[in-house]
Amino acid sequence: MTSDPDVPDPDFSLDHVRREGLMASPGTELVTHDGAGRVELSFNVEDAGGAPPTQRSVRVPPGVTVFDSASWNGIAIDSTCGGHGTCHKCKVRVTSVVEEVAQRPSRNPTPVSRHDVRTFTRDQLDAGWRLACLVQATRDLKVDVPPLTTRPKAATVGVGRQVILRPAVQKRYVELAEPDLSDQRTDLDRLLAAIDDLAPQPDLHALRRLPHVLRAADWKVTAVVVDEVLVDVEPGDTTGQRYAIAFDLGTTTVVATLLDVALGTPVGVASMLNKQQPYGGDVITRISATMLDPKTLPRLQQAAATTLAELAAQVCREGGVDPRQVYEVAIAGNATMTALVLGIAPEPLGVAPFVMATAQPPTVLASDVGLDVHPRARAVFFPALGAYVGGDIVAGMLATGMDRDKRTRLFIDVGTNCELVVSDGDRILSTAAPAGPAFEGGAIRCGMRAADGAIEVIKLGATPEDAVQLGVIGDVEPKGLCGSGLVDAVAELVRVGLLDASGRFVPDEQAPEVAPALADRLTRIGEERVFVLHRPHADAVPEECVVLSQRDVRELQFAKAAISTGWTLLLEELGLEHRDVQQVLMAGSFGSYISPASAVRIGLVPKLPVLRIVSAGNVAGEGAKMALLSVRERAGAAALLQEVTYVELSDRPDFNDRFVDQLAF
Amino acid sequence: MTSDPDVPDPDFSLDHVRREGLMASPGTELVTHDGAGRVELSFNVEDAGGAPPTQRSVRVPPGVTVFDSASWNGIAIDSTCGGHGTCHKCKVRVTSVVEEVAQRPSRNPTPVSRHDVRTFTRDQLDAGWRLACLVQATRDLKVDVPPLTTRPKAATVGVGRQVILRPAVQKRYVELAEPDLSDQRTDLDRLLAAIDDLAPQPDLHALRRLPHVLRAADWKVTAVVVDEVLVDVEPGDTTGQRYAIAFDLGTTTVVATLLDVALGTPVGVASMLNKQQPYGGDVITRISATMLDPKTLPRLQQAAATTLAELAAQVCREGGVDPRQVYEVAIAGNATMTALVLGIAPEPLGVAPFVMATAQPPTVLASDVGLDVHPRARAVFFPALGAYVGGDIVAGMLATGMDRDKRTRLFIDVGTNCELVVSDGDRILSTAAPAGPAFEGGAIRCGMRAADGAIEVIKLGATPEDAVQLGVIGDVEPKGLCGSGLVDAVAELVRVGLLDASGRFVPDEQAPEVAPALADRLTRIGEERVFVLHRPHADAVPEECVVLSQRDVRELQFAKAAISTGWTLLLEELGLEHRDVQQVLMAGSFGSYISPASAVRIGLVPKLPVLRIVSAGNVAGEGAKMALLSVRERAGAAALLQEVTYVELSDRPDFNDRFVDQLAF
């Protein structure tokens, strides 16, 4: 399902964007989208070695740039400028341009930016060449990605963040003079003297290998240094093989990205369900499980370790990388996930006053969290701001530049626990809102996770033909409703008037007046009123259908009220109005896929022009990548602990009143 | 066998000592000894808790103070001043004084120093009360040791070294406020805020225990910090239990001393043969073994680990200490022993140009060297100056204060590899001399290690009654000759004239003229001339006797020539004569037991008054204790690497000529 860029968005005009100073990146000046649905990008990735190109298709919310869509999915495109159109390196060929022009010559093809005009010839532009960081995907696109050509000094990650490459993993190839009686320096001194820009401490593993490797390799070796520790010495020149893995360790889903830290590019991406799922869908259930049975903590620890290990093996296989050449991993997870993977008892996180063991877990060996990569690889963790604003959110702040951007921005990571951050370009406040499981399909009659068969996009129309248009993951028979589908369903029913502002379905007798094409879908299961989204066959009874129930609406209403109460109070703390917010970043595996238009409609985010609502993607994973690519960015994450004020809402006396105020749509 | 202080030493007078400025400690002004034999000290150690006293007997070379004799054998005596007689704390009662006075009223009892006079009443002095650091043991003594009374700030270890207690192992007992919603500090922040004088990094083990221990112990806990790492948190107040183990990891013998680092006192001592013995008696054989079979290195590593682990268990049992309260160990070993216990291939140490993997092994976990103590206990190693002047010698320099003392001193650690250090109070030079196995009983016809039945002391007399007087370990039938017995035998035979200066036995016909009481002991086994030291029965043939053979004399001659060539060249480098040496420190498990008089006689040490030759004991173990008691001393050991110049003798063109010069007695 694609949106149509020719239909003007009522909330949006280019002049409007310019006036409001909303140009987050040069891309925003070129395209419009209505903030709903999904687009599919089909990448044809050419191989530097001359092997046949590989094909990859990805589905992203409209408005994400081609560069980000590729990067988030492990496809490397040259870039050094941070997606500002200035390095002119991220050249791709949007092959669908040619088809578009051929099929509909009167319409605009994928737009051309002024940077494109400076970079490409007329013929190249006609052939579809564009700078990937400037093409927002607003419809399905086919994109040819040329092989990497440059050895960059910087990489583009996160939400348009340019990172100067300074990874903690360093390699130095040296050719040493053999010792003799006039030069009896130790093996280590000889090696370190040849590495003039680093002064690492050796670890025992490296020392054990040093005498043999030096002599077997004829004194031509590569020193491997991770964060000022000499972890290994390898025969010959292995400086080209420097890898690290960024993990987004989510409660539900865990994502691993294998990075070539020398180039700053992803080499492989994989995700799977957290193997802790059988112990409970959310952090509280898992914490409770550890309290009931002391054997549960080691089991949860093992489950997390196995998840990480399987993902590491998978991305290494995919990238054709020897796991022993992965020298560092970064793990971004919430406070509970971090505690569990480290084997730290999480009980105090689950009960008031919600206390962590530590805000900054120490760097450990990757083997301590069950990873079978280089035996002395390090595992670094993000610091946490509080028991419910964890390392994943700090990683997200890093990826979105919450502490560097001068704009007033609202960051929302939607989930069972919803984390909120507001910055006015000066102060940064954060809090957590207990949204409940609605966004993850929990407590919803036909709820399910975002898997094949889940309705993820819903549009209601005025005619019987377009009455209910569904976007379904996997393009199969609809089986249920995932979080973004739930938000769309409620937003659309409010829009057409079948749900009133209080969240109640209008009386049966009013429905035909309000929405004649949809009224017959309003029915009951037992006493409860439901709206039929999908009827598997003409004779299906409501129980066989995919429906939205009155209780589902209430669940979502409570969730959105918790969230909007949270950001309302944070904005008030900073003395700001809703309209002052210049950008809303919807983050996380749920938040990134909620339709901005629907989020505005139901009040999940402030009532703002839809273009101010940006799908930020898996920002925790992006932050983890940044930490691996740059020790300076890593230090920046640690500094956030001082810069961000954590606001505890649960003990505010006015919280309940404000919550009730926020229940209406 | 005891020496007689009433027989004046020809080389010694108190005036002479004063003129030469030789008073190493106040003790030397009070007694004389002839530098030969052994004395036995019987300690009666009183218990602070009122338990019956425990008895311990030790045998030491004459001239060692009572304090050092106790300390080296794990018996704690109060002291804070470094054995200078100024703290007046090391009070003991020499009970044999009373017997001496009763039996031989005309003779001097154990002398009284001016510090004793200031410390004790007349009645106390008559009852035998003395300051232990001022009593040199020159005859067998019985000593009552009162229980420890003070909580000292300093301890006396090594050769009269006073160490201000600043152990790396620190404990802090804290009582914390419980968290609430107004104080959500993390467990770690809460703990660290209460420890204002330390700022440790937590390790994972401590973090894993922290949440549970804090809550189970009602927020009253003891933080355990080792070298700025928080390694544990223990319920309640455990500040009284702070232990560490000092290891002298010798090629032949391994000695462990369990230390109470809070008090600076030893709690237990144990020693055993290094379990690597089956792989060869010296370092070269063991290195060769690793070169022949790659499986040998892990086996040697395991053998060393088992040796350390068994000793640790033994000293903890002896001291009644829970091994989990041992938080640090220090290991002083030569370069090969250090490499092997760490699993670092030693081959490059065994062949020219004799290169180490590193001069300063990193601090590792005690479990990395096989120790089952606290799971996060650290193991620290001494730095090495060269492949053959290892961490044991650096520890010895620390224990003897080679870098702090302004006198010209020569340090000799006698063994298969003999290490030499010379300091003129300004520059410090060191080298290694390949002495061969003679001192360890190797290549000697009746050679054996210093075990029961070994002749360790020999005196030859002029009459048939006192013709050959033997001191035998264990007071049993003599079975062989250990290193100190070998040196005594040769020295005495040179003295009486049965060996000439070239090291040859005088012709049979000359023997009755030279030494009538001994001539009949000069005989032959096959073609080789031998001197019978012990004849098991009247009819025994020479093959059944304990003898010294002509070839044995040659072996010792080569060993002493290697050593004296070494120190001669070092003295020359510093522009010094033999007579400039103010003190010779005989160190190590062999060197400490060689009779100074005999060492002078055969030229193993410079021709000096015998009182300048000091038996320094197990200085490697003492250095390890110092490193555990004081991080400043530990830093001092590291600094020695810069202060000491290693002189390689093996490539000197004049070495062989000088060696031949040194062969004569």
Image: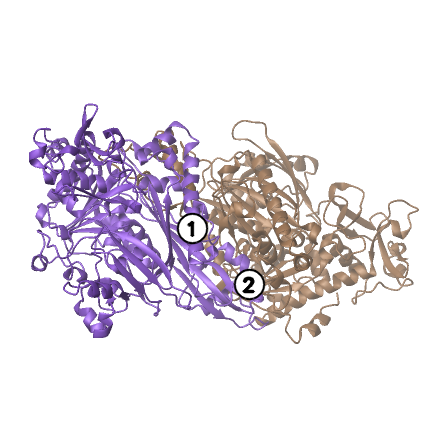
Chain colours: A brown, B purple
Mark 1: few/some/many CA within 10 Å (<14, 14-19, 20+): many
Residues tagged 1 and 2 counted as in contact (Cβ below 8 A): no
Disc 1 target residue: B312
Across and down, in percent, residue A83 comes to 52, 47
Taking the view exactly as shown, the residue that stands out farthest to the front is B538
Real-space CA distance between mark 1 and mark 2, rounded to the nearest whole angstrom: 27 Å
For this rendering, which residue is in front, A376 or B81? B81
Residue A176 in view here: no
Q: Position of residue B331 (x, y in %)?
A: 36, 48
Q: Quadrant for the C terminus of chain B, please.
A: top left
Question: What amino acid is at disc 2?
Answer: Val
Residue A375 as seen in the image, left or right of residue B360: right
Chain letter of the residue carrying label 1 = B
The circle on residue A554 is none
- Mark 2 surroundings: few (<14), some (14-19) or many (≥20) residues within 10 A: many
Q: Nearer the viewer, mark 1 or mark 2?
A: 1
Q: Position of residue A302 (x, y in %)?
A: 61, 48
Q: Residue furthest top?
A: B527
In the rendered structure, the residue with mark 2 lies on which chain?
B
Give the residue at the far bottom of this rendering: A653
Report the number of numbered marks: 2
Left or right of B576? Residue B239 is right
Mark 1 secondary-structure assignment: helix
Could one spot residue B300 in this view of the protein?
Answer: yes
**Is A397 on the left-hand or right-hand side of B79?**
right
As drawn, B178 above or below A468: below
Q: Depth check: B641 or B293 in front?
A: B293
Residue that mark 2 sits on: B213
Say which residue appears at 51% left-offset and 55% top-offset.
B205
Identify the residue shown where x is 41% and y is 28%: B293
Type of the residue with mark 1: Ala
